[in-house]
Image (cartoon, rainbow, N blue to C red):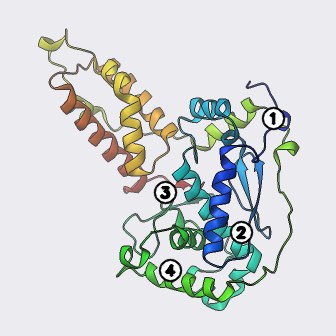
Amino acid sequence: MLNQRLNTLRVKVEGTWLTDCVQNLYEELEERGIRLRPHTWISSEWFSPANVPGIAIPFYLTHPRLMKLEHKMMLDVEGGTWSECMAILRHEAGHALQHGYQLQRRRRWQQLFGPSSKHYPRYYRPNPASRRYVQHLRLWYAQSHPDEDFAETFAVWLRPRSNWRTRYAGWPALKKLEYVDELMAEIAGKRPLLTTRERVDPLREIDQTLAEHYEKKQAFYAFKPPKTYDRDLSRLFSTDPRHRRAKAASAFIRRHRAQIRRLVARWTGENQLTLDAVLDDMILRCRELDLRAVGSERKLVMDFTVLLTAKTMHALFGPSRRKWIAL
């Protein structure tokens, strides 16, 4: 399958579970009186292009075999569940509304979110403690660019039963939510300024093979972690000769890696592929140091999860932190 070209995949939104997701989005917009219905098409990834009030959906969500391949290559399927797909669709709908109604031209919009013309970064450094931004998608994505800040704020506002007034009470981000509430009331029932049905980078025009696509996608998340965890591993596991017959720490990590990787990804926002590379390094170091897993396995799992979480957060936000890759 990896040798197959993307433009030969005969997949579409219609007739898949995505149809129900898109229809649900339309119903949410209708309930708020918003006339715009973002058109959708299949591409290589999630996005809403500039000046196009529509949403591109990644090909892998159209078929179980493609979702299985995505998980095998990326260890995750972004948008692969109903709730996650709806969260992303609401975010992309925010972009589509911004484009369709040219909201970024408004002075108040610029005052609250910043200039849409600001250079779109490849990297950004979020502050997880900031209350100036809503928290919707992972990676504190609202902090990456003014357009993303608006899209995330809109998504929080649109989600049914989000209770955003209570959730963000006392946060500076509440002003943005209140503005979106006022703005959506203003454009309710109005026809968008842009009504183009253009489809940017549709799958039929992408000549990459699946192998080439995933090679590029995996490289996007590549990260070589510094080997600063030998001391911590030695504290967690044993080098005492008396425990030489105990289970190897490397085997212990391999056994629990999927469970631990998912937990740490959920709490830190780090990509599972990146965490897997860190775990590979830890397994190698445990083997080289001949470390042994001694004691309660349940406690070791908890302690190792805490260790990996701490190391991940230090790598992301510590004094020598690396930059986040903007998705």
- The extreme left residue here reads 242
Q: Position of residue 60 (x, y in %)?
A: 68, 39
Q: Position of residue 54 (x, y in %)?
A: 76, 63
**Nearest to N terminus: mark 3 or mark 1:** 1
Q: CA distance from mark 2 to mark 1?
A: 26 Å
Q: Which residue is denoted by mark 4 in the rendering?
A: 177
The residue drawn where x is 40% and y is 71% is 130
Q: Which mark is residue 9?
A: 1
Rendered image quadrant of residue 73 = top right
**Amino acid type at image mark 2:** Ala
Number of residues whose C-alpha sits closer than 10 Å to that of mark 2, classed few (under 14), some (14–19) or many (20 or more): many
Q: CA distance from mark 2 to mark 4?
A: 18 Å
Q: Position of residue 212 (x, y in %)?
A: 74, 33
SS at mark 3 in the image: loop
Q: CA distance from mark 3 to mark 1?
A: 31 Å
In the rendered view, does 249 fall on the left or right side of 211?
A: left
Q: Which residue is denoted by mark 2 in the rendering?
A: 96
